[in-house]
Amino acid sequence: MASLIGRDLLSLADLSASELQQLLELASQLKSKQLQVQCNKVLGLLFSKASTRTRVSFTVAMYQLGGQVIDLHPNVTQVSRGEPIEDTARVLDRYLDVLAIRTFAQQELETFAKYAKIPVINALTDLEHPCQILADLLTIQEKFGSLSGLTLTYVGDGNNVANSLMLGCALVGMNVRVAFPSGYAPDAEIVEKARAIANIHQTQVLLTHDPEIAAKDANVLYTDVWASMGQETEANNRFPVFQPYQISAQLLSFADPEAIVLHCLPAHRGEEITHEVIEGSQSRVWDQAENRLHAQKALLVSILGGE
Ligand code: CP
Ligand code: NVA
């Protein structure tokens, strides 16, 4: 069993290649019920942004492990009335065993992790979405049997999902290409980190403005919303710029014929992906969403221990 006992997961780069592979293996064993684990602990969810999948999959994962969950929306805690993060973190860690946080600034998450003695999990920030990528890699592994040497192409905004995907793909020995409009590049420091990891595996991290070049012969096409949570006011200005970066049947025709299509969801049909493609035979988005449950259960067991 992967042992990440007591560790935080703030970035996918917190994991080594073998720790990530072991997490995926554990997730697969838990999904197939080859392994049954109990973990009678308490998870707190502190989410400042909306969530369907992350909130529900973490909750169900903990229930299935025999543990419990407390949903701590900032509006119902003193956080909304200005209690400092440093204080909140040092109080919550006296009650909880693990805390999953969804917020805006990565810095806020890091401050929580610095002051809380319990493990802190990044349940999405503006910079990264590591839990999503655990499920994505599990879904790709289920389709292709192994990950090493495959090529994933992400088309759209260089956002939190794109950042974590670059790190995740690099760690498992996949090639990753990101096609984005000018001005919407992924985070430069993360690109550098992903390239350093990819060098070890002799794989490629390619950034381009050309979605067709990026999609050519890819094994996985992936997209996400053009305006993330917190960017709603920019949405109207972004749409014309992002139009050429839609996953359509036309773009999919450049990929390998066996390619699968992923989207972290929620999806906006007619914007970043067409109705035809998301509902089409190559789409794996529902398996991908289900895998959030199995991947996060593996993460919780690895961090908290189980019996
Ligand atoms: N993909 C994802 O994180 O979905 P939610 O925002 O619904 O949690
Ligand atoms: N990039 C999106 C992902 C949602 C799961 C956002 O941050 O809103």
Image (spheres, grey):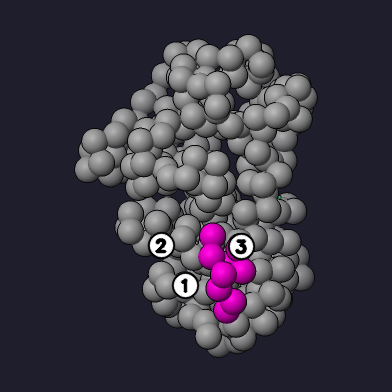
Mark 3 sits on what residue?
31
Mark 3, mark 1: which one is toward the viewer?
A: 3
Q: Is residue 174 visible?
A: yes
Q: Residue at x 65, y 65 (%)?
A: 58
Residue 182: x %, y % from top left: 48, 18
The magenta segment is 28-37
Q: Quadrant of residue 230?
A: top right
Q: Which numbered disc, 3 or 2, marks the residue that appears first in the sequence? A: 2
Does residue 36 show up magenta in the picture?
A: yes
Mark 2 sits on what residue?
22
Q: Are marks 2 and 1 in contact (CB under 8 Å)?
A: yes
Query: 31 or 233: nearer the eye?
Result: 31
- Mark 3 to mark 1: distance in Å? 15 Å
Residue 121: x %, y % from top left: 52, 64
Q: Residue at x 54, y 60 (%)?
A: 28
Residue 218: x %, y % from top left: 47, 25
Q: Quadrant of residue 206?
A: top left
- Mark 3 to mark 2: distance in Å? 14 Å
Magenta region, main secondary structure:
loop
Mark 1 sits on what residue?
302
SS class of the residue under badge 1? helix
| Amino acid of disc 1 | Ser
SS class of the residue under badge 3? helix
- Mark 2 to mark 1: distance in Å? 10 Å
Q: Residues within 10 Å of mark 1 (few under 14, many from 20)?
A: many
Q: Residues within 10 Å of mark 3 (few under 14, many from 20)?
A: some
| Amino acid of disc 3 | Lys
Q: Residue at x 58, y 32 (%)?
A: 260
Q: Quadrant of residue 267?
A: top right
Residue 177: x %, y % from top left: 42, 27
